[in-house]
Each structure stands twice: as C-alpha cells, then as structure tokens.
Image (cartoon, rainbow, N blue to C red):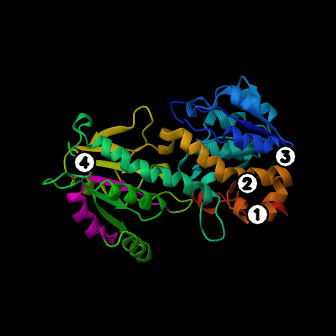
C-alpha cells in the first residue's frame, strides 16, 4: 500500500504524523511511503533520515495526492487540499469537521474520501487513544503557557506561578477534569500554584481530590461556582470536551468581565469551538489577544509548539492503526477493529458520524451498513 505524508504549513502546524522509526515500520511490512520535502523539518527530522530508511522524498504536494492510497496529515485539511483529493483515497488526520467549513465536508463527500479523524478513534471503554496523547501534552502546555503570559512583559499580572515566601501563589482555575485538566493540574500543583478544579462529574473530581491528597480545591461546575472562582483566578484553563461535538460555552462574556485585569485564559477546547464565550482561534505565530483586559490564548493545536515530542507521541498512538490498514486492507481493518471504525466520519460519499450529520443537517449512516 502507498502512504503519503503531506508537508504542513509551518505557520499553522509543526508536527508530522510519523517519525522515521514509524515510517520504517510501514516499509518493513512491504509498503511504500512518500514524504513531501521538508515535511519533518519543523520537528527536526531531516529528509536524509527518511531517505536512509527507504522512504521516497517528493517535491510537491501534487505528487503526494497522485501517488498515495492513504494520505496522512496532522492539522485539518484546508479547502484547497480537500479539492485535490482523488476519488476513493483515505485520509488520516485531525479533522474537527463539526466546527469546520461546510465546503470541506462537501468536497470530501464528493471525492468519496474515507476520512478518519484522529480525535474520533474511540475504543470500547470510551477512551480516545490518539486524542489522549495530544491532550496530555496540551494540558501540560496550558500551565506552561499561562506561567509565561502572567509575566509583566506579556501584559500579564506580573506574578510568578508558585509565589514565594510571604507572597501567595497564582490561583489556577481549571474547568474540566479530563485528560487535559488532569495534566494541567499536575503541572500547576507542581509549580506551587493554588489549583481549583471544576467539573460536572462528581466521580472525576473525587478521583482527582484523592490523587492530590485534597491539596487542590474541587467543586461542581455550575454557574454560581464559576462566577465565584473566576473573580479570584489569575489563570483559567478551559478543558471541556464533549466527544465529536462542539464544546459548550460554559463561561459567558459577562463572566469574563469579572476576571482580574491581566489574568489569562487558555482555552484548550478551542479546536472544538472553545468553552469560553470570548474565545476565537489564534495561531502559533499570533497566539494571544486582549479582550476585557484579559489575555486570551486560543491556539487550536497547542502540541505543535513541542512538535518533536508530539510527533513521537502521535506515532506511538497512530502506527498500530496504520499497520492494521496496511496488512489487512482498509475494509477488513474497519470490520475487525471497531476502535478504528469509530474514527470514520465520511465513507463512500456518506456521513458516518452522527454529530457531524446533525450539525450540517445531513443523513447519518452506520459505517457497518456501508461496508456490507
């Protein structure tokens, strides 16, 4: 099987789907891998490293589309990329189509692309194996980013996260106790911050309270508690996820106005639309803006800032699924592995993801019925 790896726009994305070791694994079972020139450069993987193991370096994205049965990306495809798919190709990428342009969906449907979203691959326990590794990174980075933007040079409150003797630490409010929230809490707590964790799931916050030996504050995520906590927070980390759905706005604009001048919001949910009403997507090059005297950091692909670590993590999680497809063929892999099948949102010109179909008022089909 022929796999192709597109080079991402470095202004938007710095990761690559597979390390040289990951590519070598696919080559070792009889596949061919084409890589667009300098696709790994932003993650410090050279063309020579990929060539040395037998991958083919090509010099345009047109060659990737022309030579590949399976196209691999990291960031959601652009409209231009969607137009260039050939009929019946398979796409593996983060997609987030539920918050994307309808034009992209229409093009992928027209081209009969089998679109598999990393964020949708879900096992029988409800875990999201690929999204989870990126969420671990994003959670750590959320605290790291917040600490930097609290500095006076960034128009922040001019405070250090952990405080010092005689000076209290920063107060970090984390909304959502999933993988992102857990990782963010661990780093913030380790830096000495006062951590407040809000979630609607009592079991989750009980588990975290036990893990941190009740040295973080936990509370239910309701309007009263949110308003109260936002007034004291130096940092707010939005970590709300509803699988395959647009994130709800749990913090309103009026609530943001309650925050301290120079406080920072890091909305990690922005790739699914954001959980803060005042959030709008920003970029790696221009990551922040100021609104209501509050710094907003809303980069949808935060792990791209640590692209090498993220690429290793993505390879670890993605490679088993690519190996299945390579060894068994796409159809058999989808039949035998329901985890992979859950990741399919478009197949044979039909929408197979119910929230996506509902968002664009289309009919949803079960992938099993289309395969049969």
Any part of residue 89 in sight: no
The image position of residue 265, as x and y in percent, is 32, 49
Q: Going 62% across and 38% down the picture, which residue do you hit?
A: 16
Among the two numbered marks 1 and 4 on one chain, the one whose residue lies closer to the N terminus: 4
* Real-space CA distance between mark 4 and mark 3, rounded to the nearest whole angstrom: 52 Å
Mark identifier at residue 24: none
Was residue 227 drawn as part of the magenta stretch in this picture?
yes
**Where does label 4 land, which residue?**
263
* Residue nearest the observer in this picture, 103 or 193: 193
Label 4 element class: loop
Secondary structure under tag 3 reads loop
Seen at 27% across and 56% down, the residue is: 193
Sequence-wise, the earlier of marks 3 and 2 is 3
Between circles 4 and 3, the one closer to the viewer is 3
Mark 3 and mark 2 residues within 8 Å of each other at the beta carbon: no
Residue located at (65% from left, 47% from top): 315
Asked whether the beta carbons under mark 2 and mark 1 sit within 8 Å of each other, the answer is yes
The residue where tag 2 is placed is 321
**Circle 3 residues within 10 Å: few <14, some 14–19, many ≥20:** few
Callout 2 environment at 10 Å: few (<14), some (14 to 19), or many (20+)?
some
Residues shaded magenta: 215-241
How far apart marks 1 and 4 lie (CA) works out to: 45 Å
- Mark closest to the chain's N terminus, 4 or 2: 4
SS at mark 2? helix
Q: Is residue 15 above or below residue 348?
A: above
> Which residue is at the front of the view, 125 or 366?
125
- Helix, strand or loop for disc 1: loop
- In the picture of the structure, the residue carrying the numbered disc 1 is 337
Residue 91 x, y percent position in the rendering: 71, 45
Any mark on residue 29, and which? 3
Marks 2 and 1 sit apart, C-alpha to C-alpha, by 9 Å
Q: Nearer the viewer, residue 252 or 49?
A: 49
């Amino acid at each position: 099987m022929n796999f192709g790896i597109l080079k991402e726009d470095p202004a938007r994305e710095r990761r690559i789907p597979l390390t040289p070791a990951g590519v070598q694994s696919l080559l070792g079972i009889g596949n061919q891998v084409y890589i667009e020139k300098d696709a790994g450069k932003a993650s410090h993987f050279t063309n020579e490293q990929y060539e040395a193991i037998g991958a083919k370096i090509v010099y345009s994205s047109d060659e990737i589309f022309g030579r590949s049965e399976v196209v691999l990306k990291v960031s959601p495809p652009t409209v231009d990329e969607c137009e260039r798919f050939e009929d019946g190709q398979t796409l593996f990428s983060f997609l987030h189509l539920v918050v994307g342009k309808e034009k992209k969906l229409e093009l992928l449907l027209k081209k009969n692309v089998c679109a598999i979203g990393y964020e949708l691959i879900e096992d029988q326990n409800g875990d999201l194996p690929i999204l989870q590794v990126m969420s671990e990174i994003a959670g750590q980075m959320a605290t790291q980013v917040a600490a930097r933007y609290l500095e006076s040079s960034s128009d922040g409150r001019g405070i250090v996260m952990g405080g010092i003797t005689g000076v209290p630490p920063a107060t970090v409010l984390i909304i959502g106790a999933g993988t992102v929230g857990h990782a963010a809490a661990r780093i913030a707590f380790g830096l000495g911050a006062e951590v407040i964790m809000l979630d609607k799931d009592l079991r989750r916050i009980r588990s975290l309270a036990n893990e941190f030996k009740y040295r973080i504050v936990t509370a239910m995520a309701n309007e009263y508690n949110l308003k109260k906590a936002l007034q004291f927070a130096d940092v707010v980390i939005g970590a709300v996820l509803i699988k395959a759905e647009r994130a709800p706005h749990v913090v309103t604009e009026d609530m943001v106005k309650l925050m301290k001048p120079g406080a920072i919001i890091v909305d990690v949910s922005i790739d699914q639309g954001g959980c803060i009403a005042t959030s709008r997507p920003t970029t790696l090059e221009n990551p922040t803006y100021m609104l209501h005297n509050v710094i907003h950091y809303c980069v949808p692909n935060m792990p791209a800032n640590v692209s090498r670590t993220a690429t290793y993590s993505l390879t670890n999680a993605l490679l088993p699924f690519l190996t299945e497809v390579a060894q068994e063929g796409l159809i058999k892999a989808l039949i035998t592995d329901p985890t992979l099948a859950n990741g399919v949102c478009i197949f044979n010109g039909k929408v197979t993801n119910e929230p996506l179909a509902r968002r664009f008022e289309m009919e949803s089909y079960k992938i099993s019925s289309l395969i049969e």
